[in-house]
């Protein structure tokens, strides 16, 4: 196998099999704020996005007047800021999702959570059927006259970048490739 072909194969494997994406919360900067309406919540965005173990959530917000608190479910439901799991106030918060299941986040600012500034993210189980190309999360289709088509037409996984880490399967392939066992 020529070295240039091997390099192309390695780059292809790296791109296809890397794990861990960096996902911009809400799909754009400055979405961590009190929503302007109940039709535009971060939980609606979260429900349309698939999260996997190893992904990271990235919040970009104004640190002068907001913060992010990771909380337990009961504190999320009550908007209780008194005992967060972790708190962040840097304006560029990056949190890795290291396990499957739900994660809960609320604003650390007085009254913001009560007005809807909160986020629930559900990370898929490692046993969830995977493919090299993740399918978008299903979107509920409502054909009533009041249906907001712009919500369904929005990109499901906008502003997602790979963090460049390889999973175990990719490492195995990378080790076998130089040995010529895959050709």
Image: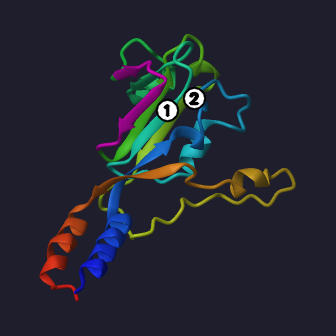
* Disc assigned to residue 146: none
Pick whichever of labels 2 and 1 is earlier in the sequence.
2
**Image quadrant in which you'd find residue 30:** top right
Gap in angstroms between the C-alphas marked 2 and 1: 7 Å
Q: Position of residue 172 (x, y in %)?
A: 17, 70
Q: Main secondary structure of the magenta part?
A: strand
- Residue 78 image point, x, y percent: 50, 20
Please tell me which residue is depicted at 56% across the width and 20% down the height of the picture: 62
Task: Give me the disc on residue 32.
Answer: 2
In the rendered view, would you say 8 is above or below 30? below
Identified at 55% across, 54% down, the residue is 157
In the depicted view, which residue is nearer to us: 114 or 167? 167
Say the numbered circle drawn on residue 59.
Answer: 1
Measured from the top left, where is residue 31 in percent x and y?
Answer: 61, 32
- Above or below residue 4? Residue 57 is above
Residues 114 and 18: in front is 18
Q: Is residue 111 left or right of residue 89?
A: right
The quarter of the picture where the N terminus appears is bottom left
Identify which residue is drawn at 64% across, 36% down: 41
Residue interval drawn in magenta? 86-98
Residue 175 colored in magenta in the image: no
Could you tell me which secondary element the residue under label 1 belongs to? Answer: strand
Left or right of 73 in this view: 136: right
Mark 2 is surrounded, within 10 Å at the Cα level, by few (under 14), some (14 to 19) or many (20 or more) other residues, namely many
Q: Mark 2–mark 1 contact, CB under 8 Å?
A: yes
- The secondary structure type at the circle numbered 2 is loop
Quadrant of the image containing the C terminus: bottom left
| Position of residue 149 measured from the top left corner of the image (x, y, whole percent) | 78, 55
User: Who is closer to the viewer here, 69 or 90?
Assistant: 90
């Amino acid at each position: 196998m020529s070295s240039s072909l091997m390099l192309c194969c390695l780059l292809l494997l790296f791109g296809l099999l890397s794990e861990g994406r960096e996902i911009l919360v809400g799909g754009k900067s400055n979405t961590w704020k009190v929503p302007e309406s109940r039709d535009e919540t971060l939980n609606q965005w979260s429900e349309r996005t698939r999260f996997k173990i190893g992904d990271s959530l990235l919040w970009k917000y104004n640190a002068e007047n907001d913060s992010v608190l990771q909380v337990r479910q009961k504190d999320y439901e009550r908007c209780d800021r008194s005992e967060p799991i972790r708190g962040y106030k840097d304006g560029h918060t990056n949190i890795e999702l290291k396990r499957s299941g739900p994660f809960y986040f609320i604003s650390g600012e007085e009254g913001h959570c009560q007005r809807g500034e909160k986020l629930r993210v559900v990370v898929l189980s490692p046993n969830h059927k995977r493919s090299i190309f993740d399918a978008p999360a299903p979107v509920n289709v409502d054909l009533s006259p009041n249906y907001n088509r712009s919500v369904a037409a929005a990109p499901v996984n906008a502003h997602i970048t790979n963090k460049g880490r390889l999973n175990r399967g990719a490492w195995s392939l990378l080790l076998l490739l130089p040995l010529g066992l895959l050709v």
